[in-house]
Amino acid sequence: DIQMTQSPSSVSASVGDRVTITCRASQGISSWVAWYQQKSGKAPKLLIYAASSLQSGVPSRFSGSGSGTDFTLTISSLQPEDFATYYCQQANSFPLTFGGGTKVEIK
Amino acid sequence: QLQLQESGPGLVKPSETLSLTCTVSGDSVSTSSYYWGWIRQPPGKGLEWIGTIYYSGTTHYNPSLKSRVTISIDTSKNQFSLKLSSVTAADTGVYSCASCGGASCTFDHWGQGTLVTVSS
């Protein structure tokens, strides 16, 4: 199974800050990574697929990069509605696996 | 617009079988465009993929749950279902159905999720 190690597990940031979350795969997965945002009590929302493709309707302040084993989600200017938990997911092969999550909190 | 909605009991006794159904609207479960999947989330914890089914009936399961999981599809009702047998308290959590489409299984549409508690 491919393990997805996500860091940090939490980050405190202010509105307007640039936030970067990383995910490392235990083996090469090309660009088959997705990123999700989950707000409390809600279902996850797809933000990024195929490592860097922005899902329709997602603000352009969200971006993804990486290939192989190392991937990054960046929020260029944090907005109040962005405080949430973020998960990466490898879509290279079954079994599908998620990272442990990163909680973005208000500083 | 594709929509998914979970339904099923919110309380299951230990050792019994958890059964949930996901009703799909906005497209057919028979489409070759999507895989259909189940994901769960224990209280306060992260996401865990349970399994996925294709319209053809092809399934993929999480190895850690494989011996207890069955996912099936009912084209006549436009639904797919989850059965998880021999449940324990560790199976308590929010269970969500979702679709994954495109070139890889990325979950682009989700149900709202349903809380299932395993308790006597």
Image (cartoon, coloured by chain):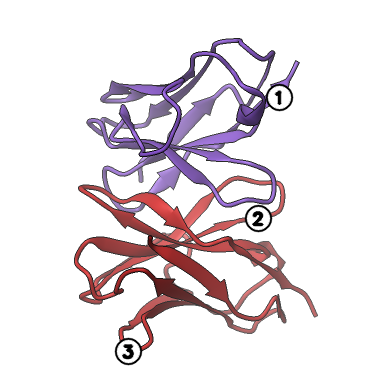
Chain colours: A purple, B red
Q: Are marks 3 and 1 in contact (CB under 8 Å)?
A: no
Task: Say if B104 sits above or below A28 in the image.
Answer: below
Q: Secondary structure at mark 2?
A: loop
Q: CA distance from mark 3 to mark 1?
A: 45 Å
Residue B23: name its quadrant. Answer: bottom left
Give the residue pinned by disc 2.
Answer: B42
Task: Say if B6 sits above or below B113 in the image.
Answer: below
The image position of residue A16, as x and y in percent, is: 61, 11
Left or right relative to A23: residue B85: right
Nearest to the eye among marks 2 and 3: give it. 3
Q: Secondary structure at mark 3?
A: loop
Q: Secondary structure at mark 1?
A: strand
| Amino acid residing under circle 3 | Ser
Left or right relative to A6: residue A94: left
Task: Say if A107 sits above or below B23 in the image.
Answer: above
Checking the image for residue B76, the label placed there is: 3
Give the residue pinned by disc 1.
Answer: A105
Nearest to the eye among marks 3 and 1: give it. 3
What residue is shown at x 19% (from left), y 66% (from top)? B32
Nearest to the eye among marks 1 and 2: give it. 1
